[in-house]
């Protein structure tokens, strides 16, 4: 079992900084959009974001063109499903990328959901087996993080990885995660942002995104575990739930919501701009607005 190097995790924290961007649109393999994706990644770096998290169960290959298009940005998988990618092939791909662009890639791993993976079984034990295979292939533990919501996976994130990248969480969960992880590991929660000051419109946009997640037991059980009720999960999510897992409103209010995660113990917050689906997959204007409101 590879031991986590605390000093290297500390270096990773400095490299990824306080803010990142989470995007499923930048994961695409469509060749006709490669130039735009590369330009968008380069702009995110110029805007001051230190890390880019690719959604939609990406693999190392999805990160390669974005790493090449930038000079400092860390590109991470947020999250790669252990059912979809072979551990040995993953480690080999990372080694190749590390040889040319050292320190620029971070592997985020998760067990996905039963309805999304044909071979889904014994998720915790399967994650342990996957980490064992990565160890055997020579991937350092501090170059990976785990999607961890519950206590057992958080402990695994502490002991077998650089830390955790929890998705669809609250500052209260972040405080619990920090307590479980301890001080040293990286804690990088994801937060969805709706850049809209109208309450009804912002919550409607948020519910459009949340709907899919409310069909997945991993998330609904997580919400119940951290204090929400079945009523909160009904009809697209209560206002209470929406307001807890999305940041929306004025720039000051959104900044306060982001800051709450840092106050609760996050080292890095990765921000997903949520827009009406008709507005496209790369919310570049939203990223620019986020960068502006995050300036000291």
Image (tube, rainbow, N blue to C red):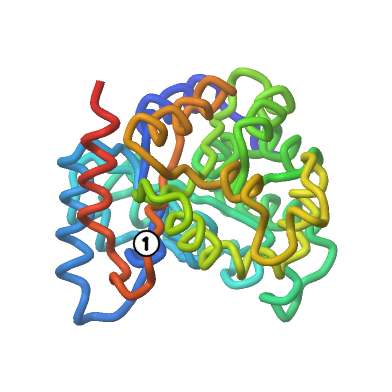
Q: Residue at x 61, y 53 (%)?
A: 134
| Of the pair 141 and 124, the residue shown nearer to us | 124
Please name the residue that numbered disc 1 is placed on: 275
Q: Is 230 left or right of 76, judged from the image as shown?
A: right
- Asked if residue 198 is positioned above or below residue 258 in the image, the reply reads below
Q: Is 36 left or right of 64, judged from the image as shown?
A: left
Taking the image as drawn, is residue 181 in sight?
A: yes
Taking the image as drawn, is residue 135 in sight?
A: no
| Of the pair 94 and 55, the residue shown nearer to us | 55
Query: On the rendered image, what quadrant is the C terminus found in?
Result: top left
Q: Residue at x 61, y 30 (%)?
A: 4
Query: On the rendered image, what quadrant is the N terminus found in?
Result: top right
Q: Is 4 left or right of 25, judged from the image as shown?
A: right
Residue 189 image position (x, y, % from top left): 54, 40
- Asked if residue 225 is positioned above or below residue 201 in the image, the reply reads above
Q: Residue at x 71, y 70 (%)?
A: 215
Q: How many discs mark residues in the rendered view?
A: 1
Q: Is 122 left or right of 146, judged from the image as shown?
A: right
Q: Residues within 10 Å of mark 1 (few under 14, many from 20)?
A: many
Quadrant position of residue 202: bottom left
- Asked if residue 76 is positioned above or below residue 16 in the image, the reply reads below
| Of the pair 252 and 4, the residue shown nearer to us | 252
Q: Residue at x 21, y 72 (%)?
A: 34
Residue 293 image position (x, y, % from top left): 27, 33
Q: Secondary structure at mark 1?
A: loop
Residue 129 image position (x, y, % from top left): 75, 56
Residue 227 image position (x, y, % from top left): 79, 40
| Of the pair 225 and 236, the residue shown nearer to us | 236
Quadrant position of residue 35: bottom left
């Amino acid at each position: 079992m590879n031991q986590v190097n605390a000093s290297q995790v500390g270096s990773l924290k400095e490299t990824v900084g306080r803010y990142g961007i989470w995007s499923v649109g930048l994961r695409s393999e469509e060749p006709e959009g490669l130039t735009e994706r590369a330009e968008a990644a380069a702009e995110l770096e110029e805007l001051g974001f230190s890390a880019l998290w690719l959604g939609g169960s990406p693999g190392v290959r999805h990160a390669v063109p974005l790493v090449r298009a930038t000079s400092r940005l860390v590109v991470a998988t947020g999250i790669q499903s252990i059912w979809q990618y072979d551990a040995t092939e993953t480690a080999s791909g990372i080694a190749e990328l590390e040889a040319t662009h050292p320190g620029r890639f971070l592997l985020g791993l998760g067990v996905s959901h039963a309805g999304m993976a044909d071979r889904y079984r014994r998720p915790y034990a399967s994650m342990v087996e996957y980490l064992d295979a990565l160890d055997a292939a020579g991937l350092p533990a501090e170059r990976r993080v785990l999607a961890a919501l519950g206590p057992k996976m958080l402990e695994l994130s502490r002991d077998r990885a650089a830390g955790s990248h929890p998705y669809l969480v609250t500052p209260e969960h972040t405080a619990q995660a920090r307590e479980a992880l301890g001080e040293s590991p990286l804690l990088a929660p994801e937060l969805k942002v709706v850049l809209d000051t109208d309450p009804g419109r912002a919550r409607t946009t948020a519910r459009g995104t949340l709907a899919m997640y409310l069909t997945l037991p991993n998330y609904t059980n997580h919400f119940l575990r951290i204090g929400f009720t079945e009523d909160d999960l009904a009809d697209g999510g209560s206002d209470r739930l929406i307001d807890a897992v999305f940041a929306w409103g004025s720039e000051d209010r959104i900044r306060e919501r982001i800051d709450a995660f840092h106050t609760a113990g996050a080292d890095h917050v990765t921000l997903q701009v949520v827009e009406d689906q008709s507005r496209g997959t790369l919310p570049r204007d939203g990223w620019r607005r986020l960068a502006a409101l995050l300036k000291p």
